[in-house]
Image (cartoon, helix red, strand yellow):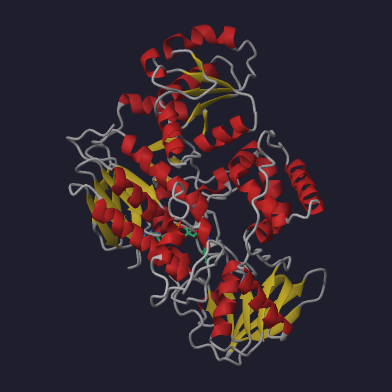
Amino acid sequence: MSNPSTPQRIVIVGGGLAGTLVAVHLLRRAPSGTLISLGERGPLFGRGVASATDACVHLLNVPAGRMSAFPDRPDHFVEWVRERTGRAGFPKTVNPDDFLPRCLYGDYIGYVLTEARQQADPSVSFTARVGEVVDIDELPAGGAARVFFSDGTTLVADQVVLALGNLPGEYPVRSGRQVYRSRNYVHVPWAPGVIEGIDPEAEVLIAGQGLSATDIVIQLAERGHRGRIGCLSRRGLRPLPHRRAGTPYRDFLAGEPAPATIRALVRRIREEVRTAAEAGGDWRDVIDAIRPHSARLWAALDWSERARFMRHVRPYWEVHRHRLAPEIAARLQALVDKGRLEFLAGRFRHLEETADGLRVIWRPKGSDVDVERRVAKLINCTGPRTDYSKYQHPLFINLLARGLLDHDPLALGIAATPDGRVRRYRGGVIPWLHTLGAPLRGVLWECAAVREIREQAAAVAGSLLTVEAGGGAPSRFQRLVEEAKSHIVEVGVEELRAELAAGEKSLLIDIREPEEHVRGGIPGATHVPRGVLEGRIEQIAPDIDTRIVLYCAGGNRSALSAENLRRMGYTRVRSLAGGYGAWSRAAESR
Ligand SMILES: Cc1cc2nc3c(=O)[nH]c(=O)nc-3n(C[C@H](O)[C@H](O)[C@H](O)COP(=O)(O)OP(=O)(O)OC[C@H]3O[C@@H](n4cnc5c(N)ncnc54)[C@H](O)[C@@H]3O)c2cc1C
């Protein structure tokens, strides 16, 4: 628990959706004196790239009924809109199945933050700080870290949260990079004013066919663009539409062990889609029913299977999973039918600046002949890159140089535990550094939509508030725990819960003291206090390949015990990240 005499200083880097929701949970629960700073490069808090749009034609791609900021209050967003229906910028009526403008969602998150600030304990300090964070340094004493802003100012923090969102995309072709300085090339499609100044008769090419590409097309159409718009992607797959008012599908994966190969997983999903279709159902409901199991399914795949997923399955998964609002899909189709929009399959080969635009050479899929196009503008919507450790931003360069950043084996995100504790370069967890959202893609895969972010935000805030305040150098105990965690495997609460629900067998051992155990624990656990664990384990688990999960109150003692069992030869022992505390908090927020 926090020590009231030394209040915690928490700095959140990134004031988009994730960072703002962490701040909201902290404001609701932080003890007296806590100092919370939310650092955001832009002037708008709670919006991030998705909701910063002022174009109200950009709709959420998830129905309003699933967009509440709080998992335990699913109607919160719809009710907030309903109370304001008819006002300027708000719809006249609202239903949970409606796809509402993203700018409205940004207003909602801003409101949630304002309300949390008004209701917080007056002694809890909150500062919204506009500025670019360019470095974070670990302090030997007097605070865990120092956060540097680009204007030279700094903040000392006991805990830091990286809520950085997505990185911009890769360049369409690697050679001839000078073309990317051209004013006819747009690298970041979310930047304000990207379509300003485009001649309505001119031809525009968009690299990519996903949700950001859709945004640009809709924005151009809204402005009365009459020139041809092309969207080019390798496979030519575009997002499929939502169905209005989907029907919740049965939890078909509950009680099933997670397949260990991507081939088996795809086979299982296809089989279920067929079953659903035979019963008159829709594949979309089956895809949505996978969502609560995604972290468990991902965890069951080793890195080579995950690599196979990325190579062969991901593009198909993306278009089925990240769907378009039906009205947006209908508008795209109408543009295609009028010959104003085309979806192209192929790869970029060469780009060159010309006097009035760009010369684009591309190779259609399945062809061995290049094709040339002259376009006024090329807008890059290839989807976010994920290799944070290679991204040339001072923050990542500095974190890497300090050994405070690593990537997972496929560079899908930042190396971290499932509950968002960042790992040192080739090392154990950093006790004061946390992350959530897109940087957790390598660990969780599904992690960057509102549904996941709102749960992660509550969990990260909870774990920040259970850390001892006072900062400073890590104690010898903390160092020991950190060392142990760099050798062992941890399991997150959601992952464990899903495994238990699926009937995946693990020997669950509560290693807390008897007086802690009697106050409550995880159902089905065996109680073996830590002091006698090594002496008894061979009777309880004679097979060294037994799957074992150890838990204590906060995940530290169990990490030390897991390390001991690992050294005794146990091959499949894990420690519950965040311990019983995290387990109970997750249960409360359900
Ligand atoms: C176009 C688009 C549409 C989406 N639509 C939906 C949807 O309909 N439904 C859904 O569930 N999900 C949607 N998502 C996915 C997801 O919900 C959003 O991306 C969400 O905003 C992610 O939250 P975040 O906080 O992780 O990132 P962001 O909201 O992007 O916030 C990250 C913030 O960090 C700031 N930042 C980064 N680096 C620094 C730094 N060094 N210093 C200071 N500040 C920094 C950025 O300025 C940004 O504001 C969408 C995503 C995009 C891109």
Residue at horizontal 45%, vertical 46%? 72
- Between residue 19 and residue 252, name the one nearer to us: 252
Picture quadrant where residue 321 is located: bottom right
- Above-or-below relation of 73 to 258: below
Image quadrant in which you'd find residue 481? top left
Coordinates of residue 559 in the picture (x, y in percent):
46, 25
Q: Residue at x 73, y 68 (%)?
A: 236
Placement of 554 over or under 17, stated as above or below? above
Whether residue 576 appears in this view of the structure is yes
Compared across the picture, whether 331 is left or right of 184 comes to right
- The spot of residue 247 in percent (x, y) is 65, 54
Instruction: Describe residue 517's horizontal placement relative to residue 37 as left or right.
Output: right
Query: Exactly how many numbered labels are in the figure?
Result: 0
- Tell me: 88 left or right of 391: left
Taking the spot 67% from the left edge, 33% from the top edge, the residue there is 255
Does residue 380 appear in this view?
A: no
Q: Position of residue 92 (x, y in %)?
A: 46, 74
In-front residue for pair 351/235: 235
In the shown orientation, is residue 196 left or right of residue 241? left
Q: Position of residue 406 (x, y in %)?
A: 49, 45
Q: Is residue 89 above or below residue 96?
A: below
